[in-house]
Image (cartoon, helix red, strand yellow):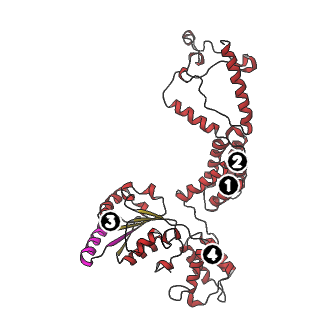
């Protein structure tokens, strides 16, 4: 069922609709090197074959997983022979191009530059991370998107109607509910949709692919979640930003997407602890306790029982008062600490021996518990070059509202003490 023309190819209107640059380039036979970036089953290989067919170029295919530098040289030599003997160009299609190491990319680069081959690379990974700048600068990147449920429905309809390559000769009936179920379970992947359809067709009774047959083949299917890839980090980013944005329902959705896709719940638990400190902090210190408790529950109960604790933590964090004051303060303190090793002021130094006391260690230190309000007003605990520095600036929300009031009161006591020369 691989599409034989652009009109048969479903989805990707952002690059293939009439008037779009790639569609125009294909129609005008203006070949250029490109990288097709998108999830599995979105048409990367098919599109490369259609470009080659439209242009009349020879189509050579390499798998970056299996090919070495020698295979690249052989393909280049074949492209040269094709140019001399047949007078036509060569499209070198490299599947999983992100798997090419630096040596392989360097071996390919000059032949892309001089036009010996037109490179079409397919990747599920962000090419800006995986391809070196020299090769990437000579290719245009086209982003392919997961197919919608409606587009997958069209793919299914084509397969059911096609008597040559599909299931059209079997007279199968697919109820609308079963069609939608298969399209949703395919999760944007046309190849998966066709695979599920074929399996369900084999289980059809009396020529109808009913709900029971579809349910049988869909059991155990997981959604798109490439651990370590862009989808993985995008979904975690979406969860974190939903919590930060006080959107508990969206946070629950992204949590469910990750767990449903097979993400390690312990990893999610660790990220939730980070959220509690980074985005809530002292505005509601209970957030960190609850996040740690959720982590503990996941370790003790595992999945799926522990997932409810993660959901509890995520909703609490999303609804809690927000503050990044501790996060900003820590970054600022680290920046000062990394600028150089300033000495500890003498009055703050430890003095366990007579020599240290004679050198002035601990001299004039004021024991805060013996001072009015338990506070040594006017005292400074910084090295001299940093005296008066402020890192922590509580926000006017949650508990930090009270913390800010207290710090303001202490600052006023400091001001009075210094006015008196204390």
Residue tagged by mark 1?
A: 251
Q: CA distance from mark 1 to mark 4?
A: 27 Å
Is residue 366 something one can see in this rendering?
no
Location of residue 213 with respect to 130 vertically, above or below: below
The mark nearer the N terminus, 2 or 1, is: 1
Location of residue 312 with respect to 189 vertically, above or below: above
Image-quadrant location for residue 120: bottom left
Q: Residue at x 71, y 20 (%)?
A: 413
Q: Residue at x 61, y 74 (%)?
A: 150
Residue tagged by mark 2?
A: 317
The mark nearer the N terminus, 2 or 4, is: 4
Q: CA distance from mark 3 to mark 2?
A: 52 Å
| Extreme-front residue of the structure | 19
Residue tagged by mark 4?
A: 182
Residue 412: give x, y in percent of width and height: 70, 22
The residues colored magenta run 69-93
Q: Where residue 72 is drawn, which disc sits there?
A: 3
């Amino acid at each position: 069922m691989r599409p034989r023309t652009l009109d048969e190819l479903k989805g990707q209107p952002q690059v293939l609709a009439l008037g779009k640059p790639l569609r125009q380039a294909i129609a005008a036979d203006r070949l250029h090197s490109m990288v097709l970036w998108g999830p599995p089953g979105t048409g990367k290989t098919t599109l490369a074959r259609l470009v080659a067919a439209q242009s009349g170029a020879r189509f050579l295919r390499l798998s970056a997983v299996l090919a070495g530098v020698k295979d690249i040289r052989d393909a280049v030599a074949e492209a040269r022979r094709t140019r001399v003997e047949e007078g036509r160009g060569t499209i070198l299609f490299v599947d999983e191009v992100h798997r090419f190491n630096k040596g392989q990319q360097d071996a390919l680069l000059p032949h892309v530059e001089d036009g010996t081959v037109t490179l079409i690379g397919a990747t599920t990974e962000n090419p800006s991370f995986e391809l070196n700048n020299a090769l990437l600068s000579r290719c245009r990147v086209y982003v392919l998107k997961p197919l919608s449920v409606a587009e997958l429905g069209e793919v299914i309809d084509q397969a059911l109607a096609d008597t040559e390559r599909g299931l059209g000769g079997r007279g199968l009936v697919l109820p609308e509910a079963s069609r939608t179920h298969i399209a949703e379970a395919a999760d944007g992947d046309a190849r998966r949709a066709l695979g599920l359809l074929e399996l369900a067709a084999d289980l059809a009774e009396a020529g109808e692919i009913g709900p029971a047959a579809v349910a049988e083949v869909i059991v155990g299917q997981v959604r798109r979640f490439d651990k370590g890839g862009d989808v993985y980090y995008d979904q975690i980013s979406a969860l974190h930003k939903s919590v930060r944005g006080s959107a508990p329902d969206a946070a629950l959705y992204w949590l469910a997407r990750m767990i449903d896709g097979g993400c390690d719940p312990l990893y999610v638990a660790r990220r939730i602890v980070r959220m509690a400190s980074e985005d809530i902090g002292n505005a509601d210190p209970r957030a960190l306790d609850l996040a740690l408790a959720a982590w503990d529950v996941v370790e003790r109960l595992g999945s799926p029982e522990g997932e409810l604790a993660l959901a509890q933590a995520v909703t609490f964090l999303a609804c809690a008062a927000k503050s990044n004051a501790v996060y900003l303060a820590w970054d600022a303190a680290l920046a000062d600490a990394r600028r150089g090793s300033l000495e500890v002021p003498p009055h703050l130094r430890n003095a366990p021996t007579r020599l240290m006391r004679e050198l002035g260690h601990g001299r004039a230190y004021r024991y805060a518990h013996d001072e009015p309000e338990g506070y040594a007003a006017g005292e400074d605990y910084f090295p001299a070059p940093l005296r008066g520095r402020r890192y922590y600036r509580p926000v006017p929300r949650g508990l930090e509202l009270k913390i800010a009031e207290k710090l303001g009161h202490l600052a006023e006591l400091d001001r009075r003490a210094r006015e008196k020369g204390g």
